[in-house]
Amino acid sequence: MSGSLSGRQRLERALAIVPWIASRGGTASIDEVCRRFDIDVEQLQSCLDTVSMVGVYPYTPDALLEVFMEPDHITVNLPEYFTRPLRLTPTQTFGLIAAGRALLALPDADPQGALARAIAKIENSTGVGSAVEIDIDPVPPEVREVLGAAIEAHQRIEIDHYNYNRDIWSTRMVDPWRIQAADGHWYLEGHCHQAADLRRFRIDRIGSVRVLDETFDPPAELPEFTAFAADHSLPTVTLDLAPAAAWVATQYPAEAIERLGDGTVRVTLAVSAPAWLERLLLRVGDDASIVEIDDSLRGTRAAAARRVLQHYLH
């Protein structure tokens, strides 16, 4: 392999190279490593540059990985904590299983591969596997196949996408980069030509996909994926949610969540469009009370109720 590696590629190779060298007595020739992992010396150096900064608190020299790259060989010394069996807390175990299952839900993941076998071993040894459920929106097979093929072939696509906040459908031309799962939903990430910027689209809100006869060059290194970035310029509403409406706190990106003693959940939400807040308030009904609301949003619940009533009277 020639050329520079992306950050993800460097990480993937470093995670494979270091354990492999350690399993061989802690030393291996550079030529052997390059052949084994199909990289050149410069790429090998880039993979190992950040490894020496990996460790645990307090990040003193004795708590860091030791990787020495000599002219003809590499030496790896693992700190003591790497030689002891890993003891996970119940919370860590739950998180590890949940993350692993989410990865297995990715398109083209191998349900019988090494990750699946490792998760099964953890579940069997801890007994917590049966208590873990991953609730994630499935990707419709036809959409997954079209998006996956377009991403692989670097083909531009056109999508019909529903904007929940504005309650409108729009057609977007997108250079698809990748599919990611976050917060129980699948997202398509790519360059949107209408916005002339990076955009993330929830796949369950994509009505149709059309592959165009155009190709694109993807970025050498993809940005860190975040499904939601808070916009502090938006007006906000703070709601007290009864237990029956507590799902709101996890279904929508929240700026603040507070669990009160009586089971009530207090949540602060950014409101990008009054129509979205109207629909939410109508949906939760008496299970939500407004604690604080931006002046620009006052009267939202009453206005929504009037519109619904008017609809039934005509």
Image: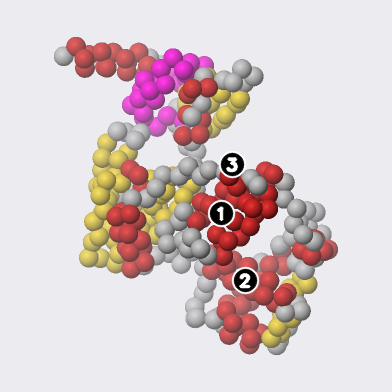
Q: Where is residue 297 in the image (x, y as percent from the top left)?
A: 40, 20
**Element marked by disc 3:** helix
User: In the displayed structure, would residue 106 be above or below residue 133?
Assistant: below
The residue mark sitting in front, 3 or 2, is: 3
Q: Position of residue 214 (x, y in %)?
A: 25, 65
Residue for badge 3: 131
Q: Is residue 183 left or right of residue 122?
A: left
User: In the displayed structure, would residue 175 be above or below residue 265?
Assistant: below
Residue for badge 2: 16
Q: Foreground: 28 or 116?
A: 116
User: In the displayed structure, would residue 84 be above or below residue 284?
Assistant: below
Magenta-colored stretch includes residue 289: yes
Residue for badge 1: 100
User: In the displayed structure, would residue 100 be above or below residue 66?
Assistant: above
Q: Where is residue 3 in the image (x, y as percent from the top left)?
A: 49, 78
Q: Foreground: 82 or 164?
A: 82
The residue mark sitting in front, 3 or 1, is: 3
Q: For the residue marked with disc 1, what is the amino acid?
A: Gly
Separation of marks 1 and 2 at Cα, in angstroms:
18 Å
Q: Earlier in the sequence, mark 1 or mark 2?
A: 2
Quadrant, the C terminus: top left
Span of residues in magenta? 270-296
**Element marked by disc 2:** helix
Separation of marks 3 and 2 at Cα, in angstroms:
31 Å
Q: Is residue 13 visible?
A: yes
Q: Which residue lies at the image location 42% right of the left edge and 29% below the top edge?
A: 271
Q: In this view, does 174 lie to the left or right of 50?
A: left
Magenta-colored stretch includes residue 194: no
Q: Which residue lies at the image location 62% right of the left edge and 71% below the top edge?
A: 16
